[in-house]
Image: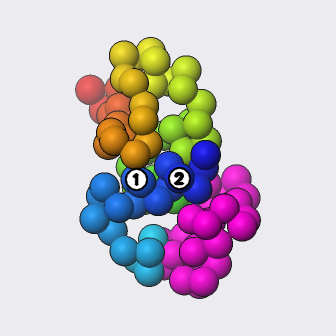
Amino acid sequence: MFNDRLRATRMFRGITQQKTADAMGVSLRHYQKYESGEVEPDFMGLSEVADFLDVPTDFLLGRDDYLKSLGVSVDVSLECPPRRPKSRKNQ
């Protein structure tokens, strides 16, 4: 689930694997292992990639409760991932 959502989000955003790997501070090959499902990032890696791709970590982890609260139906192959809501601190 994580690897599919990671790949779909990156591709939807039009970002290369190399740029995403650089943002996470890992090699291209290591990043490719995330997308293939061979390995998963640690908590910090998950946070970094979610920030870089501008999606909630819950989306990448497949926790649909967040998305249901927004009224969003998720089909990784067909729909774009939602952007994170802006912080209310600055409003």
User: Measured from the top left, where is residue 11 in percent x and y?
Assistant: 35, 61
Q: CA distance from mark 1 to mark 2?
A: 8 Å
Q: Amino acid at mark 1?
A: Thr
Q: Residue at x 36, y 16 (%)?
A: 71
Q: Amino acid at mark 2?
A: Asp
Query: What residue did someone put label 2 on?
Result: 4
Which residue, given by chain and number where applicable, does mark 1 sit on?
9
Q: Is residue 23 above or below residue 27?
A: above
User: For residue 37: magenta?
Assistant: yes
Q: Nearer the viewer, residue 77 or 48?
A: 77
Q: Position of residue 17 (x, y in %)?
A: 44, 75
From the top left corner, tell me how far across and down residue 72 is, in percent.
37, 23
Circle 1 residues within 10 Å: few <14, some 14–19, many ≥20: many
From which residue to which does the magenta span run?
21-47
Q: Secondary structure at mark 2?
A: helix
Q: Quadrant of the C terminus?
A: top left
Q: Give residue 86's mark.
A: none
Q: Is residue 45 left or right of residue 68?
A: right
Q: Is residue 22 magenta?
A: yes
Q: Nearer the viewer, mark 1 or mark 2?
A: 2
Q: Residue furthest front?
A: 77
Residue at screen point 54% across, 83% down: 28
